[in-house]
Amino acid sequence: MPAKLLTVRNPTSSSRRSNRESVGAMGSGGLDIPIARRTQLAKPQRRFRFRQSLVTASLLLAGTAALVWLFRDPIKRQLAPPPVRGLNVRQGLDGRLLGHFPYPEARSGDLVDAAPGIALQRDAAEAFLAMQRDAAAVGVSLRLLSGFRSIELQKHLFFDVGSERNQSAEQRAQVSAPPGFSEHSTGYAMDIGDGHSPGSNVSQSFEATPSYGWLVQNANRYHFSLSFPAGNPQGVSYEPWHWRFEGSAEALKLFEPAHRLAP
């Protein structure tokens, strides 16, 4: 009887093949993922999160820088000491201090006498004298009461006179500007009175004089305007005697913030 041939299988290779098939089947069904594959999928997520955080931080930094640049002047004003020594008040966002805009002091070389002891900027002086002559021709007596005031003189008028009258800084600012914030320091502002009614000088009763009536009708012809009319948006008391010259580019530039504030 012929001998049967026995086929001997290699259990090692068979088990290896079986294991590979088993792993493949489990992997395709989502039941088992090799550790190496898990590690490779986690890395891109960490990089994405890092990039996202970096972009967010950059946007926040750029936004903060833009806000600082946009509000640099208000920030400077808040960090700087008060603009007037002895007055613990800071400027508003539009630059005003107790209602008054800041103004520079005129250079002495730009000033000329418009009346005995009273100086004005050259252009303002010429315009006022022409206006005064034309008013006199119809019997109206315009009198120049005050013109240029130095910042030092304004300091005396604000602090010393306010102290004599027992006025707070807020009360004093309604009738007199703090030093460095007065239109008079520019040489373009003036106080005008009526030569026939001296009792109305620097008083609201000036509005009842022929001089005031003539100014209302004609001052614009000479480039003068009333600085503080009744109910003005700066909150300064009504001053019918206080006029300013706006007949030059420099004057217009100085008083432009006040015009921008007006309704």
Image: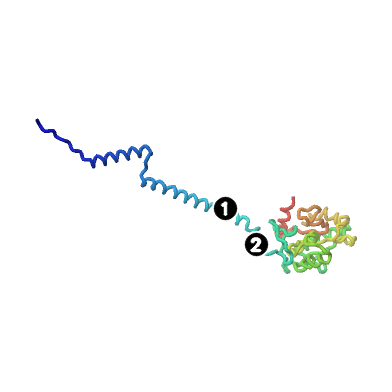
Q: Secondary structure at mark 1?
A: helix
Colour basis? rainbow
User: Which residue is located at x 62 percent, y 58 percent?
Assistant: 72
Viewer-proximal residue among 196 and 63: 63
Does any portion of residue 22 appear in the rendered image? yes
Percent x, y of residue 227: 78, 57
Check disc 2 and report the residue beneath it: 79
How far separated are the C-alphas under marks 1 and 2? 21 Å
Q: Residues within 10 Å of mark 1 (few under 14, many from 20)?
A: few
Viewer-proximal residue among 136 and 244: 244
Of the image marks 1 and 2, the number of the one nearer the N terminus = 1
Residue type, label 2: Leu
Residue 229: image quadrant is bottom right
Residue type, label 1: Gly
Is 73 on the left or on the right of 195, as rendered? left
Task: Name above or below for residue 166 compared with residue 21.
Answer: below
Q: Secondary structure at mark 2?
A: helix
Task: Name above or below for residue 31 compared with residue 263.
Answer: above
**Screen quadrant of the N terminus:** top left
Viewer-proximal residue among 61 and 253: 61
Check disc 1 and report the residue beneath it: 63
Percent x, y of residue 166: 83, 64
